[in-house]
Image (tube, rainbow, N blue to C red):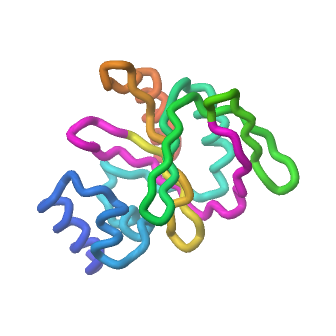
Amino acid sequence: MSELTAQVNELLAAEPALRPVEMASRLEVSEWQVMQCLPAELVCLLCGDQAQHLLEQVAGWGPVTTIIEVAGSVFEVKAPLPKGRSGYGYYNLFGEPGELHGHLKLDAIGHIALQSKPHRGKEAHAIVFYNDDGHCVFKIYLGRDDKGVLFPEQVAAFHALKELQHG
């Protein structure tokens, strides 16, 4: 076991609610480095070249929460992920008003994590996209109903993605 894996395991045991980004900050490593040390029941690691396939899958799942963290600020969009198409070197998202709209540089995605880690005491699952330096580009969390319960069909689809990776 590497020293970093031991440190991550110690943090998980001492503070199970700690988010990977917070662990990374404390350990002075990238979030991706922390992801690589998490137990298999919490994370499934993928190559970045699977980003478009995953985005195309999620576009059919209904409301999700897309999160972008920049310089300590957190931006959230709670809406279905729009379908996209490739063009001019980007994967272009064309959301309806109130939905996500933008241009993703998919060749800048080096790694992806399918993360299953409770957040604030609730079951949570996310698809997390990282650049080659191990810094998070954005996260897509599964959606919740008005009572805060995850949509069961999204949970099933998320687990199916993990199963495909483990063959």
Q: Is residue 12 magenta?
A: no
Disc count in the image? 0
Check the image and report above or below for 123 versus 14.
above
Residue found at the far left of this picture: 14
Q: Residue at x 68, y 46 (%)?
A: 52
Q: Residue at x 72, y 40 (%)?
A: 93
Residue 74, image x, y percentages: 45, 52
| Residue situated in front as seen by the camera: 40 or 88 | 88
The span picked out in magenta is 100-124
Residue 31 lies in what quarter of the image?
bottom left
| Residue situated in front as seen by the camera: 76 or 13 | 76
Residue 40, image x, y percentages: 33, 53
Check the image and report above or below for 153 versus 77.
above
Q: Is residue 112 magenta?
A: yes
Left or right placement of residue 135 versus residue 52 in this view: left
Residue 159 lies in what quarter of the image?
top left
Q: Residue at x 79, y 40 (%)?
A: 85
Q: Residue at x 38, y 76 (%)?
A: 29
Residue 122, image x, y percentages: 25, 36
Residue 82, image x, y percentages: 67, 32
Left or right placement of residue 70 versus residue 27 in this view: right
Give the position of the N terminus as an image quadrant. bottom left
